[in-house]
Amino acid sequence: MIVNSDVWTSLMAVIGEVTILILVGLLLTGLGLAIIAFSSITNGKFYFPRILKPGMVLMEGLVRAICKLLGIDDKDLLTFFVKLHNAMNTKAFAAVPLDKRAVFLPQCLRSSRCPANLTPEGLRCMRCGRCGIGELNRRLEEAGYQVFIVPGSTFIKRMVKKYHPEGIIGVGCLMEIKEGLEMCDRMGIPALGVVNLKDGCVETLVNWNEVFEAAMLGLDLPSGSVHLYSSAD
């Protein structure tokens, strides 16, 4: 069948116009999201969080590029992303019973002299006292938590599939936390992220009190009772 050239030309013109409108719409949407993120970061507030959260996931590349033009670097934007997710997930996470929650710690937090061996479910802490994991592990397990010390995201996915936690706390570097929060969103699990104070592959640092405070969300505890240590390390 031969298509009339005028009809074909008109069709292509319409397709071109629609494509341009879509591109302009995406650009304006990305610009709007970037401006909202920029304002939120500079003012220390979350503006339109229910729009920002999915928007930054769906249009991450464009928002990141525009934010760079506005003077916001990737680290600041990722930090904001994690804080935004934490703020929006706090209420749902706090409603989850402690025995339905899980904490995932990266193995890089352990001492270089750690005696623990790797098992199919991650490292089994021996509470040797060489790092801060042992005390946190003891307190959380006594409260009902499942605690996993894992070398990577593959272990996390496997443990989530096996034990079906209803709330998750993840500890790690900034990018790992960002990706983990997105993964939990896709699974429909409320999750909180705690970013390491020091990155690396060996003997990294985290604020243990911050991890424990996040773990105790939803409990009515006396002031000061959630502190594990006097310092971050």
Image: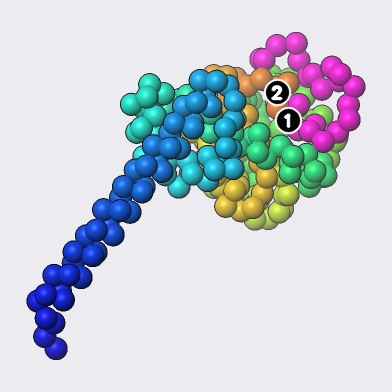
Element type at mark 1: helix
Q: Position of residue 163 (x, y in %)?
A: 72, 53
Q: Residue at x 68, y 45 (%)?
A: 190
Q: Which residues are magenta?
A: 213-233
Q: Position of residue 197 (x, y in %)?
A: 57, 19
Is residue 230 among the parts visible in the rendering? yes
Q: Which mark is residue 101?
A: none
Q: Residue at x 38, y 21 (%)?
A: 71
Q: Nearer the viewer, residue 189 or 80?
A: 80
Indicate the quadrant containing the C terminus: top left, top right, bottom left or bottom right.
Answer: top right
In the rendered view, does 148 fall on the left or right side of 98? left
Q: Measured along the vertical axis of the image, is residue 116 above or below residue 59?
A: above
**Is residue 193 a member of the stretch shown in magenta?**
no
Residue at the disc numbered 1 = 214
Choose top left, top right, bottom left or bottom right for residue 4: bottom left
Q: Position of residue 70 (x, y in %)?
A: 37, 24
Residue type at tag 2: Glu
Instruction: Report crowding for label 1: few under 14, some 14 to 19, many 20 or more residues within 10 A (C-alpha).
Output: some
Q: Which mark is residue 210?
A: 2
Q: Nearer the viewer, residue 71 or 168?
A: 71
Indicate the quadrant containing the N terminus: top left, top right, bottom left or bottom right.
Answer: bottom left
Q: Residue at x 31, y 47 (%)?
A: 24
Q: Nearer the viewer, residue 218 or 70?
A: 70
Is residue 79 among the parts visible in the rendering? no
